[in-house]
Image (tube, rainbow, N blue to C red):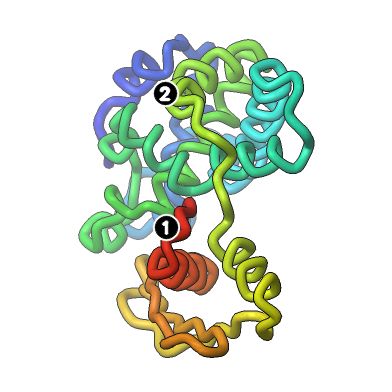
């Protein structure tokens, strides 16, 4: 079981009226399964709201708050550029950085197997739990409470004032089309690693160029990395 969640509430800047919401947000489904079956974990106190449901809600709250924030910050920017900024701010990597900043892994309640397997440092678990925490903030304190945390936690990313990031796969596709070449092709080479932290290897090919291999925790992430690496050989800077 993770550390006392009171410390997490302090990091979030909110005192919960219903602390069970925050407890649910950091209780991974692997442990919830044990609690329901009575195998090696203490019973959950009340039905609560499942981790996945809080994650679902938090994802939507984060998306809304970031969207309105971007409209305020960039009043003259077109929808396409705003969409790219939005995607960069709500993706797994951004959620993981916020999770690290509030030391979220320390508070996760995981099954023994998940904990032993490195679950507290698993980027997917941390991103999902961060969304669940946002969902808990919203249910306990309302939109203003969730918005206040999001604006504080995501401020470093927004304040850098960087131009809208380029999607590596889109940039590579445009590069190939601009030179009259067929669209890039992606081939999954293999998948390795444990189920909770898989590693995919994908090869990208563009006519007239040497193929490049990328890797990542999902097929899409591996494709993006491969595309980004190929673009770098062409001197094109992208966000991968």
Indicate the position of residue 129 as horizontal and vertical percent values. Answer: 46, 42
Q: Residue at x 61, y 13 (%)?
A: 141
Query: From what the image shows, is residue 108 above or below residue 39?
Result: above
Residue 216 shows in this picture = no
Q: Badge 1: how crowded within 10 Å, few (<14), some, or many (20+)?
A: some
Residue drawn at x 72%, y 22% is 71
Residue 162's place in the image compared with 205, above or below, is above
Q: Nearer the viewer, residue 100 or 89?
A: 89
Circle 2 crowding by C-alpha within 10 Å: few under 14, some 14–19, many from 20? few
In this image, 104 relative to 77: left or right?
Answer: left
Q: Identify the disc placed on residue 122.
A: none
Identify whether 222 is placed above or below 77: below
Q: Which residue is mark 1?
A: 30
Percent across and percent down for residue 240 are 46, 56
- Write down the residue under mark 2: 156
Residue 178 rendering spot, x and y as whole percentages: 68, 70
Expressed as whole percent of the image width and height from the top left, the position of residue 17 reads: 53, 11
**Mark 2: which secondary structure?**
helix
Which of disc 1 and disc 2 is earlier in sequence? 1
């Amino acid at each position: 079981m993770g550390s006392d969640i009171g410390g997490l509430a302090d990091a979030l800047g909110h005192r919960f009226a219903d602390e069970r919401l925050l407890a649910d947000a950091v209780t991974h489904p692997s442990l919830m399964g044990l609690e329901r079956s009575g195998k090696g974990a203490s019973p959950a106190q009340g039905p609560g709201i499942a981790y996945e449901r809080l994650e679902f809600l938090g994802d939507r709250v984060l998306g809304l708050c970031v969207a309105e924030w971007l409209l305020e910050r960039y009043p003259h920017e077109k929808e396409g550029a705003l969409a790219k900024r939005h995607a960069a701010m709500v993706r797994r990597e951004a959620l993981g950085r916020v999770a690290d900043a509030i030391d979220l892994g320390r508070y996760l309640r995981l099954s023994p197997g998940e904990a032993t397997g490195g679950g507290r440092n698993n980027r997917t678990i941390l991103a999902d739990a961060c969304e669940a925490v946002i969902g808990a903030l919203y249910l306990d304190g309302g939109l203003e409470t969730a918005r206040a945390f999001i604006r504080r936690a995501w401020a470093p990313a927004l304040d850098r004032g960087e131009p809208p990031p380029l999607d590596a796969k889109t940039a590579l596709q445009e590069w190939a089309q601009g030179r009259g070449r067929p669209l890039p092709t992606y081939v999954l080479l293999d998948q390795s690693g444990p189920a909770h932290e898989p590693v995919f290897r994908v090869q990208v090919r563009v006519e007239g160029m040497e193929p490049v291999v990328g890797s990542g925790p999902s097929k899409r992430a591996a494709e993006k990395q491969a595309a980004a690496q190929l673009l770098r050989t062409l001197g094109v800077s992208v966000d991968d």
